[in-house]
Image (cartoon, rainbow, N blue to C red):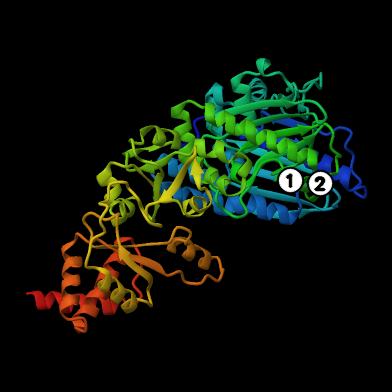
Amino acid sequence: MVHSIYSNKDIFLRELISNASDALDKLRLESLVNKELEVDTSDLHIQLEIDKEQRTLTVRDNGIGMSHDDVVSLIGTIAKSGTAELLKQLRESPEQQERAELIGQFGVGFYSTFMVADKVTLVSRRAGQSQGTRWESAGEGTYEIESLDEAPQGTAVTLHLKPEDSEDKLFDYSAEWKVREIVKKYSDFIAWPIRLSGDDSDAPLNSMKALWARPRSEVAAEEYNEFYKHVSHDWTDPLETVHMKGEGTFEYEALLFIPARAPFDLFMRDGHRGVQLYVKRVFIMDDCEALTPRYLRFVKGVVDAHDLSLNISREILQQDRQIKAVQRRLVKKVLATLKEMPAERYTTFWTEFGRALKEGLLDDTENREALLDLLRLPSTHSADEPTSLRAYVERMPEGQKDIYYMTGETRAMVENSPHLEAFLAKGYEVLILTDPVDEVWAEQVTEYDGRSLQSVAKGQVDLGSEAADKPEGFDELLSWLGTRLEGDVKEVRLSTRLTTSAACIVGDEHDITPTLEKMYRAMGQEMPHTKRILELNPEHALVKGLRDAHAADAVSPALGETAELLYGMALLAEGGELSDPSRFTRLLADRLARSL
């Protein structure tokens, strides 16, 4: 099962070195902002130790370290739940995509050690604390943990290597050449020296060059890919790389990545953002919210600013004028990169991140036009291929003035809605919006390329082909229905959007949709109920029959029941909920019985 997930076992060392690098970053930052912390930061480094006789490989750092509670929460949870529960769920998830999501959920880093080790031992002491912690597990669902009176500051992870790896020289991780090869390939850009015990020269195995500070022409694609995996803890290559430099009054370098797949926490309230902030190569913080808006939270990478204070806080960053200027440039660059992406790759991006990108239409008015150009939306034009708004406009037939759309829970529900009948009959394309966020942005975005965005379920519809003469003889029926159904609707009128259905329910042009009303209530917001409009098809036999029956006997009890049934059918046709389903079914059953 493990080998079906990981195509390359070498990544375990990359992950351990990446964790060690993070620990060193955090110690240096803590020493700068916490003057009471007494630590030696003169020789921060990562040490690799090989014992060929005992077949062990140790990755040691003198970074921030972990307390006993840190070990239990960060490492113990992965070993206890991550290994046993992960394998259980993997066996039940045959699809590769589902397996990938599970691995992302539990964290690939520490778990990857058990690909090459029978047993893993961790010893750690947090900077500023006197007591250390020793943790050990064979990765089979249990672990042992104990406190230590003495332990060096930082963390040491010792892998007791599996014996079978010694038989295959390509995977002998007790061989010095193999360790050197992996470090050079995957961790050459790490900012801290990576040393190998027993190397008389004491020279680092890595170049320690900040990748973002090097000219793009000097960086190979493989180096970008490995750096992305370092900052993101993803195991797949990025979809796109954005390398840029800002000069002038505020200098910075940025190396950003657009992932090829969405992280499991993309839509979680406390999900991580991906951009790290450095100041003159000094790590400042993970998940810097001030650098990217929330709708671009999937972007990973690094921004290295030259003119910020090392002890700047998140609160100050949010208000910093220069940081806001950097954010504007980053956003425009990312959006421009997406626009220039080849169609096939952009389809991959949209499938993974389109829902998140739509959120920008709510808040980022400065880039709204660029975001609208990036939309790929389902429509009645094709059952399989989504469309851009630009392509929609280019297909508009002569005489069509507006861009039409309809929101709903599913594509099938929208496609079968009576609201679409006249539009489809005219050959007009209708956008099908079924994401929850569509309900919100479609209310706020009123036009694209000078054309109004018009809901087919709202307002009056003018399709330009209706007869000049209004159908006659319906005024009394409409007035009576308006009174009879006044508890449910605010108006009853004749429809120009129906061709085959008897009735439909629509909202006024500026009314909130029932789905959005329901969403706000679910979030705890008090919302007054919005009455809507019942539209009748004057050409339908049921509506004509109801008109004639009302003219013949306006006080007949059967007329009132028919009015309720007509309203109920219109409500169900759009996927709405009946206020009294039992009464509706009873009236319908009685009416059917009388027809037999």
Residue 60 lies in what quarter of the image? top right
Return the x and y of residue 328 as percentages of the image width and height.
69, 37
How dense is the environment of label 2, judged by Cα within 10 Å: few (below 14), some, or many (20 and up)? some
| Residue plotted at (45% across, 58% down) | 509
Q: Position of residue 300 (x, y in %)?
A: 63, 37
Q: Quadrant of the C terminus?
A: bottom left
Res 476 → quadrant = bottom left
Taking the image as drawn, is residue 65 in sight?
no
Which residue position is annotated with label 1?
123
Mark number, residue 151: 2
Q: Label 1 is placed on what type of residue?
A: Val
Dot 1: what SS? strand
Task: Determine the CA span between mark 1 and mark 2.
Answer: 7 Å
What SS does tag 2 mark? loop
Amino acid beneath label 2: Ala
| Picture quadrant where residue 581 is located | bottom left
Q: Answer with left or right where residue 212 lies relative to residue 10.
A: right
Left or right for 333, reference 447:
right
Between discs 1 and 2, the one toward the N terminus: 1
Locate residue 247 relative to residue 37 in the image: left or right: left
Q: Residue at x 45, y 46 (%)?
A: 453
Q: Residue at x 81, y 31 (%)?
A: 250
* Residue 299 image offset from top left, x and y in percent: 61, 38
Kindly indicate whether the residue at mark 2 contacts the one at mark 1 (C-beta within 8 angstroms).
yes
